[in-house]
Image (cartoon, rainbow, N blue to C red):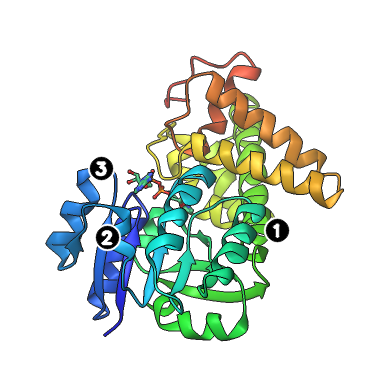
Amino acid sequence: MTTIGFVGLGIMGSPMAGHLVEAGHDVTGYDVGPTGLDKLKAAGGAAAASAAEAVRDKDIVITMLPQDEHVEQVFRDVLEHANPGTLYIDFSTITPQTARWTAQEGTKKGLRVLDAPVSGGETGAVNAALSIMVGGAEADFEAARPIFGALGKTVALVGGNGAGQCVKAANQLVVGGTYALVAEAILLMENLGADAAKGLDVLAGGLAGSKILELKRESMLARNFVPGFRIDLHHKDMGIILQAARQAEVSIPMGALTAQLIAAARAMGYGSLDHSALLLVADALSGRAETDGES
Ligand code: NAD
């Protein structure tokens, strides 16, 4: 049995921690809110009163937190309270720089550090079917395999520390851009008199097909934007992507445009909706803001 400290028991972290309990590990969790702690206790894990308590004397420490600032804050507790040799895995989506900082500072304290952002959404977390992109040393990746195996289906070591976050940035670039184009395709079909539902079925079966068309075309057509993955979090990710592109000195005009559309969605008050709500931005840009699902 492996002892695990798990900090950040939200939409993603809560089911992930539950799977680790099911896999037979001794999981102690911490979250600033009560909901995730209650769920973990119900699943057979233990609740800590602080991050420091959760990470002390554990074989493995895991974080699944919203953004860089939260990871930085909790990682300071990890540095202070985790034992040398502890394997630290951060599943959050943050900047590659912060991931590298955790690796540099962690190594000084004898910690083994992996960045391991995930894709697959809440459904992927609940079904233990996440895609996990990992940055770090090969030996640490191998040591973490049982953890990844309990949480995901597609797992790859994609480079050194920070590389997992680089691949996650690329993932979010494609997801955001795809939503923006699917939204425009829907708008086009609806306003040219074509049957948009049948049209999307055809698109999904051809070269334009994608996981997004497969999973989201019906809810988008119905203008149902219950999250899922919130616009606010994708806005955070677009910031990471643009910063990474600037650092790499590459030009990503499609990414920049997608970032502006997501910023518009947020400015229109859709920050808490699913990121497929980019369709509402497309509607508004064409003066179809009143469309409410009956089109
Ligand atoms: P969430 O907001 O539901 O969960 C984050 C949890 O962290 C919350 O329960 C919050 O209370 C807790 N928290 C914040 N600060 C804390 C602190 N200092 N100490 C302890 N707990 C703290 O977010 P989520 O949807 O679970 O996403 C987590 C990360 O995973 C984000 O980086 C997100 O971008 C990424 N992600 C999310 C999805 C998704 O579909 N939701 C998919 C892939 C990746």
Asked where in the image residue 126 lies, by quadrant, the reply is bottom left
Q: Earlier in the sequence, mark 2 or mark 1?
A: 2
| Picture coordinates of residue 43, whole percent (x, y) | 16, 65
* Front position in the image: 122 or 19: 19
Residue at (58, 36) in percent of width and height: 235
Is residue 16 among what the camera can see?
A: no
Note whether ligand 1 is within 8 Å of mark 2.
Answer: no
Query: Residue 212's spot in the image, x, y percent?
Result: 55, 51
Residue topped by disc 3: 33
Disc 2 to disc 1: CB gap under 8 Å:
no
Under mark 1, the amino acid is: Leu
The Cα atoms of the two marked residues, 3 and 1, are separated by: 44 Å
Residue 32 percent coordinates (x, y): 29, 44
Badge 3 marks a residue whose secondary structure is: loop
Front-lying residue, 108 or 186:
108
Label 3 residue near ligand 1, CB within 8 Å: yes
Tell me the element at label 2: helix
Q: Nearer the viewer, mark 3 or mark 1?
A: 3
Q: Nearer the viewer, mark 2 or mark 1?
A: 2
| Disc 3: CA contacts within 10 A as few (<14), some (14-19) or many (>=20) | few
Query: In the image, 245: left or right of 265?
Result: right
Residue 176, numbered label:
none
Q: Which residue is mark 2?
A: 53
What type is the residue that disc 2 sits on?
Glu
Reading the image, the residue beneath label 1 is 207
